[in-house]
Amino acid sequence: MINKKELWERCAAFHGHVCGGLTIGYQAALYAAKLLGLTFSQDEEVVCICENDACGVDAIQVMLGCSVGKGNLLFHLRGKQAFSFYNRKTGESVRLVLRERPAGMSREESFAYLQAHQPEELFDVKKTVIALPEAARMFRSVKCECCGEITAENMIRLENGKSVCLDCCHAYNRFDVS
């Protein structure tokens, strides 16, 4: 069993430095693991939906094995320090939302505050608002008939009878004219 100090050091090594943002993800991952009985995800047993793309996401990758490539790290960008965790084995889930910190702290004071508190003191525990996403799917590769690049089938659009990638497709929206 890896201890908290070693986990923190692994997170810092992966991220490249220590900071308050990394601490937020570290604390969220610790709390989610405790609440849902999570361990490192070898495949997609654990799913995390992050509402930000900040430093804390790196800690979640290191600690819980969630990654974009495996399809169990997803982004629903809302600019919030909020993370939804799902345990596929049990069907349980939780959304952790960072509480407001005392105003007027410097970066150093904020870092110290986040490090000094237990996860239970930092996050509100809420119900998840997004249903557990389906497991990652494999899609057939299709050649774009415009640029010739290979594209996942679900990202192809039909335009003038041709299969085209999103980069080559001309968007059609009559209400969003600049």
Image (tube, rainbow, N blue to C red):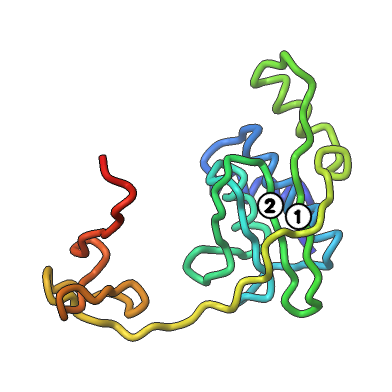
What's under tag 2, amino acid-wise?
Phe
Height in image: 92 above or below 63?
below
Question: In the rendered image, which residue does mark 1 sit on?
Answer: 95
What's under tag 1, amino acid-wise?
Arg
2 or 1: tag closer to the N-terminus: 2
Image quadrant where residue 39 sits = bottom right
Q: Using the numbered discs, state the Cα–Cα distance from disc 2 to disc 1 in whole angstroms.
A: 6 Å
Mark 2 neighbour density, 10 Å: few (under 14) some (14–19) many (20 or more)? many
Do the residues under discs 2 and 1 have CB atoms within 8 angstroms?
yes
* Residue at the front extreme, as displayed: 175
Q: Nearer the viewer, residue 162 or 39?
A: 162
Left or right, residue 131 beside residue 157: right
Q: In which quarter of the image is the C terminus?
A: top left
Question: In the rendered image, which residue does mark 2 sit on?
Answer: 83
Tell me which residue sits at (68%, 47%) in the image: 82
Tell me which residue sits at (53%, 46%) in the image: 53
Tell me which residue sits at (52%, 71%) in the image: 70
